[in-house]
Image: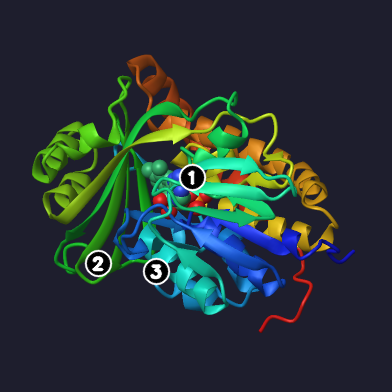
Amino acid sequence: MKNENSTTHRQVAVVGAGITGPLLSLCLVKLGFEVDLYEAYTRRAQDVGSFLNLAPNGRAVLENLGLADRILGQGTAADSISFANHKGRELAQNPERTTNIMRGELSGALREAATGMGVRLHTAKRLAALEMTGGSRWRIGFEDGTQAEAGIVLGCDGVHSATRGLLFPDAPRASYTGVVGSGGRSEIDALELPVDGRFHMTFGLRGFFGYQVISPGVVWWFENHQETHERSFAELAQIDDAEWVALLADRHRPDPAVIRRILSASTGPVGRWPVYEVPPLETWHREGAAVLGDAAHAVAPHLGAGAALGMEDAYELALALHEHPTAPQAFTVFEQSRRDRVAAMAKQARQTGAMMTPDRWITRVIRDLMLPMAMKQGVRKGAEAYSYRPSPWPVQIS
Ligand SMILES: Cc1cc2nc3c(=O)[nH]c(=O)nc-3n(C[C@H](O)[C@H](O)[C@H](O)COP(=O)(O)OP(=O)(O)OC[C@H]3O[C@@H](n4cnc5c(N)ncnc54)[C@H](O)[C@@H]3O)c2cc1C
């Protein structure tokens, strides 16, 4: 059924212009909604963060919208993902084609596509308050003291979502996963480390390391390791880049030498961050407002699935709002259709994480014994995770 909402209910405020927010805004505008997209920061999206690996299910969403080549052209394809243990022995290969792309480039390209379709993007608008007005509209308050109104509010404001906190004050907060991640870029002679189209992953003894030679002489890499004591983003940022890279090189001393070679050739800033996840929420919506993407269900990053899951959410929620006469009905249907998938991915991410960054020697020994079989199973499960196919788009894509 086509949406019969009043004009008021076709006015949507989307909070957060990371990945889920711009894509959701774009889908909604294509379906005839009027969308304001509010983002806390003023900096260019392109200037933010490290790279991420976008799985085929994320690409499938963009393909359905006719945007895959335009958006993912900013990244580099990985023809396969290979997994090795700390001795460099290959354990498994995932033959799926994925895309490595700077998170900021992805976000920036999505923002550009959204504003090109008519989405109104407002930067330096950090959500601080949310209340219902008499006419069942939302009044949205920002940190700078300004206000806006909308019929529907959709929180895509990430793992520490203010929307989630305001809608569900009793909901659990994001919790630290015990993992610190970092990522950077290195320059190494192309003869020494040639472009091979592969995303290489190593289960090191004391941390997990991944890299791809993106173009001749340029390597993108990331590292995850266990740190029981939680350090804030600000604390980690205080450490000098060279010191951080030296610490990582030391941590990976027992692992294949290529890891230390890549770290020693690191150029430019090295991003680093404590990793959080959102414990399962009782519900993702309240009246005419909902949370999605990381704001609703940030999963540990070990599967490289969060961005693609947020894209699936954005696409399916836009369709549900188009199909159902009221926002709460659409939210209910959306949640029912998404919960099992998200829970399965969260479980798989936790299991993979336990293998990647074991904190005790005994866990490490068991992991190394189990790894070959677990990896084969993991690749099979990965294929299941990638197998999501977006619902058909109901209108002609312009
Ligand atoms: C270490 C690490 C590695 C990862 N690797 C991968 C990977 O390889 N592949 C993958 O698919 N995923 C990966 N992820 C997960 C992925 O980054 C997230 O799932 C994805 O970014 C979620 O998108 P989002 O738009 O929901 O949230 P975000 O990308 O976090 O965007 C939220 C946006 O909201 C804005 N915002 C926040 N608060 C407010 C507010 N109060 N008011 C207004 N705006 C606000 C923020 O500035 C931001 O722009 C990784 C995550 C981590 C931590």
Q: How far apart are labels 1 and 3 at the CA level? A: 22 Å
Q: Nearer the observer, disc 2 or disc 3?
A: 3
Query: Viewed as shown, does residue 70 lie left or right of 377?
Result: left
Q: Residue at x 68, y 53 (%)?
A: 152
Q: What SS does tag 2 mark?
A: loop
Residue for point 31% across, 32% down? 225
Is the C terminus in the top left, top right, bottom left or bottom right quadrant?
A: bottom right
Closer to the chain start, of discs 2 and 3, is: 3
Q: Which labelled disc corresponds to residue 194?
A: 2
Which disc number belongs to residue 158? 1
Question: Badges 1 and 3: C-beta atoms under 8 Å apart?
Answer: no
Q: Residue furthest right?
A: 1
Confirm if mark 3 falls within 8 A of ligand 1. Answer: no
Q: Does the rendering let one see residue 10?
A: yes
Counting from the top left corner in percent of width and height, residue 287 is at 74, 42
Protein image colouring: rainbow
Q: Is residue 119 positioned above or below 271 on the image? A: below
Rendered-image quadrant of the N terminus: bottom right
Q: Counting other residues with Cα less than 10 Å from the Cα at mark 3, is it few (<14), some (14-19), or many (20 or more)?
A: many
Q: Which residue is mark 3?
A: 75
CA gap between label 2 and label 3 equals 18 Å
Q: Amino acid at mark 1?
A: Gly
Q: Is residue 188 left or right of residue 47?
A: left
Residue 389 image-quadrant placement? bottom right
Pointer 2 residue Cβ closer than 8 Å to ligand 1: no
Q: Estimate how packed mark 1 is, as few (under 14), some (14 to 19) or many (20 or more) residues with alpha carbons within 10 Å.
A: many
